[in-house]
Image: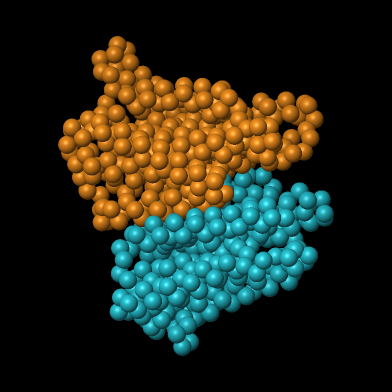
Chain colours: A cyan, B orange
């Protein structure tokens, strides 16, 4: 890695997304300005950052999974479940915020543990394992809840609605989670083991990395991030919602955001900084389209094109660089 | 994926029971069929059985298409949205006019082929992992269909279009009615088996097992992978025609089908990542999944809990397959 860093071109896939973000901001800002609006007004900035926060926290967790060469399709249902656990435990009372938060973290960690054990000990492909766990949670949610349940006290809604200047508290939470994740991935022993495991599982294991343990930890972290996002959504909605995760498409969108940030699905390459860029890029595109009052469904189309195009550019650049050597 | 050397005995055993084998799914299917037989013996009356096969046909066809993609080491996450798009497009273009049926069916099949071709070319020429390509295609198709219809499906399918999903050859002795869906299924299944026995199938398996080795051995890797996506797209189009016949026109008709199809394929012993498993296994996996849902329905397990039971059984089945592969 270190020798490679010297010869690596300045723009690679993990910072390419920041370049794309800058270009999008400039072009989008001009487009919106000619349309008579402003992309950088207080209102649109706040809603843009607000939107980024929820997806962002999930995507940071998903980054761990994808770095390990795994993925987590259960996050959407974990979000719904934890939003309900939070709202029902709080039941509108201020004193029960702490127990509710702890319960959410414990349940989401347990789900991550199950995911990790299924993948490592029972050797189930991560795609199927997390899909199956997701189906289990979905069944429980649909059986037990027809609509929103529980209530969040006003004190907890500060997380969803307060802001510092133009920056929502939730966005600060997202940045905080991302910063912690960055330190863990880049500065801890676990982080190095994570990259090694994702790069080549067999080589990592033969080098003495306890890859099973790494994968289990990774899935616990990813689920906890989904749980935190569930807390945020509960605070935002004022209640728990059994379908908020699935309707938001958090499973596939979080994977898309991570990949947009330059991570390779096969594992071992990518990073939190890229993911933050990917999330912001998706949010900015959303914001621009909102300002231009484009058909909301058309946004989906653009998203799809942007994601595929970005990955194609990364992949072709990577091949070009390999060919040049 | 893994390249460890395996003792001959272990390999022989893996051949029969482990990853890629169809026997685990056969056992599960037989158990489920016995359970249904005990609960409701009339399930085995030929007309009821044919009706069950008719209902299962779209998923089996989707699973067969998905198999080609998965065995080459790819994913196709776009099939569910493709089914929805096809049904919505057909309804709007036909708009109740019987004369439009023929051209629209041709268009539906052509669109499936086109979507598969785009998926394949983007994945092979632009080097985008198929998970992302088809995820992008999923977003594009969903968004495009909503945009095109303005948020709610318009138009109606003609009776001639619905015939393929609903009706059959009537007045057959003993069997009653032979649904067109079952005939279509049989033809496609036979074609799928033949395709996997041809050179194309062998190269496809080799590509899934080790793309690099396949390329060095002279296999046209990009070509066969693209064809696999085209097959998957066409299968989705056929499934859409059948599903359009069964039910109404809605945005929900294809929702989640991509995951169900992938689950069915994996249940049939096909390994994600490619190289192992048979198309018969994939189709049996789909049949097993449909049988499981029928059984849950008979047992009175509510629709909501059914997905939980489904999840549990899939995990168990795949776990048992995986553990067997190790021993």
The answer to whether A102 appears left or right of B323 in the picture is left
Q: Is residue A156 above or below residue B230?
A: below
A62 or B288, nearer to the observer: A62
Query: With respect to residue A304, does B41 lie above or below?
Result: above
Question: Which one is in front, A178 or B268?
Answer: A178
- Of residues A92 and A265, the one nearer the viewer is A265
Q: Is residue A233 visible?
A: no
Quarter of the picture holding the C terminus of chain B: top right
The residue under the point 45% across, 41% down is B117
Horizontal relation, residue B49 to residue B284: left or right: left
**Point 42% across, 54% down: residue:** B139
Q: Toward which corner of the image does residue B16 lie, by quadrant?
A: top right
User: Residue A194, percent across and down?
Assistant: 71, 60
* Residue B316 percent location from the top left of the image: 59, 41
State the image coordinates of residue B24 (x, y, percent, origin top left). 60, 30
The quarter of the picture where residue A235 lies is bottom left
Q: Could you tell me which residue is drawn at 51 percent across and 68 percent down? A: A20
For image coordinates 49% across by 26% down, the residue present is B192
Numbered label tally:
0
Residue found at the far bottom of this picture: A165
């Amino acid at each position: 890695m270190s020798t490679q860093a010297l010869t690596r071109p300045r723009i690679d896939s993990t910072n390419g997304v920041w370049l794309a973000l800058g270009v999008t901001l400039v072009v989008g800002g001009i487009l919106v300005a000619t349309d008579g609006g402003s992309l950088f007004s207080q209102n649109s900035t706040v809603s843009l950052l607000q939107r980024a926060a929820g997806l962002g926290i999930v995507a940071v967790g998903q980054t761990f999974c994808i770095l390990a060469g795994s993925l987590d399709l259960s996050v959407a249902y974990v979000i719904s479940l934890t939003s309900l656990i939070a709202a029902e435990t709080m039941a509108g009372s201020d004193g029960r915020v702490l127990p509710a938060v702890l319960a959410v973290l414990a349940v989401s960690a347990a789900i991550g543990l199950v995911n990790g054990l299924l993948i490592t000990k029972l050797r189930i492909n991560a795609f199927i394992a997390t899909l199956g766990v997701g189906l289990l949670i979905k069944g429980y949610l649909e059986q037990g809840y027809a609509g929103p349940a529980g209530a969040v006290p006003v004190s907890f809604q500060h997380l969803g609605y307060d802001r510092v200047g133009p920056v929502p508290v939730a966005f600060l939470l997202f940045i905080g989670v991302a910063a912690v994740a960055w330190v863990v991935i880049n500065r801890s022993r676990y982080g190095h083991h994570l990259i090694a495991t994702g790069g080549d599982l067999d080589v990592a294991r033969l080098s003495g990395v306890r890859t099973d343990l790494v994968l289990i930890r990774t899935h616990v972290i990813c689920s906890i991030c989904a749980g935190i996002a569930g807390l945020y959504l509960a605070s935002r909605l004022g209640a728990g919602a059994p379908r908020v995760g699935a309707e938001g498409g958090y499973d596939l969108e979080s994977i898309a955001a991570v990949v947009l940030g330059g991570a390779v699905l096969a594992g071992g390459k990518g990073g939190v900084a890229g993911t933050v860029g990917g999330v912001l890029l998706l949010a900015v595109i959303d914001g621009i389209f909102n300002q231009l009052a484009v058909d909301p469904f058309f946004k989906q189309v653009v998203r799809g094109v942007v994601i595929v195009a970005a990955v194609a550019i990364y992949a072709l650049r990577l091949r070009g660089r390999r060919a040049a050597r | 994926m893994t390249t460890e050397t395996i003792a001959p005995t272990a390999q022989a055993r893996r051949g029969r029971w482990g990853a890629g084998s169809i026997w685990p799914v056969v056992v599960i299917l037989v158990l489920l069929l016995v359970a249904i037989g005990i609960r409701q013996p009339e399930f085995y009356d030929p007309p009821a059985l044919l009706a069950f096969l008719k209902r299962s046909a779209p998923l089996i066809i989707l699973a067969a298409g998905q198999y080609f993609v998965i065995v080459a080491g790819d994913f196709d996450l776009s099939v569910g949205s493709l089914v929805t798009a096809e049904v919505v497009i057909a309804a709007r273009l036909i708009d109740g006019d019987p004369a439009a049926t023929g051209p629209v069916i041709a268009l539906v099949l052509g669109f499936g082929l086109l979507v598969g071709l785009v998926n394949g070319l983007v994945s092979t020429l632009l080097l985008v992992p198929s998970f992302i390509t088809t995820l992008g295609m999923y977003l594009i198709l969903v968004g495009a269909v909503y945009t095109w219809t303005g948020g709610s499906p318009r138009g109606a399918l003609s009776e001639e279009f619905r015939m393929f999903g609903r009706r059959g050859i009537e007045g057959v002795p003993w069997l009653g009615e032979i649904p067109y869906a079952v005939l279509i299924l049989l033809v496609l299944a036979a074609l799928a088996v033949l395709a996997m026995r041809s050179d194309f199938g062998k190269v496809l398996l080799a590509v899934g097992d080790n793309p690099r080795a396949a390329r060095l051995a002279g296999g046209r890797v990009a070509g066969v992978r693209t064809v696999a996506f085209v097959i998957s797209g066409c299968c989705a189009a056929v499934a859409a025609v059948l599903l359009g016949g069964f039910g109404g026109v809605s945005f929900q008709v294809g929702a989640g089908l991509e995951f169900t199809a992938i689950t069915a394929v994996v249940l049939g012993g096909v390994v994600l990542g490619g190289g192992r498993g048979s198309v018969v296994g994939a189709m049996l996996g789909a049949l097993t999944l449909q049988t499981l849902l029928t059984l849950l329905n008979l047992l009175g397990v509510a629709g909501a809990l059914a997905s939980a039971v489904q999840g549990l059984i899939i995990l168990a089945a795949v776990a048992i397959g995986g553990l067997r592969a190790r021993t």
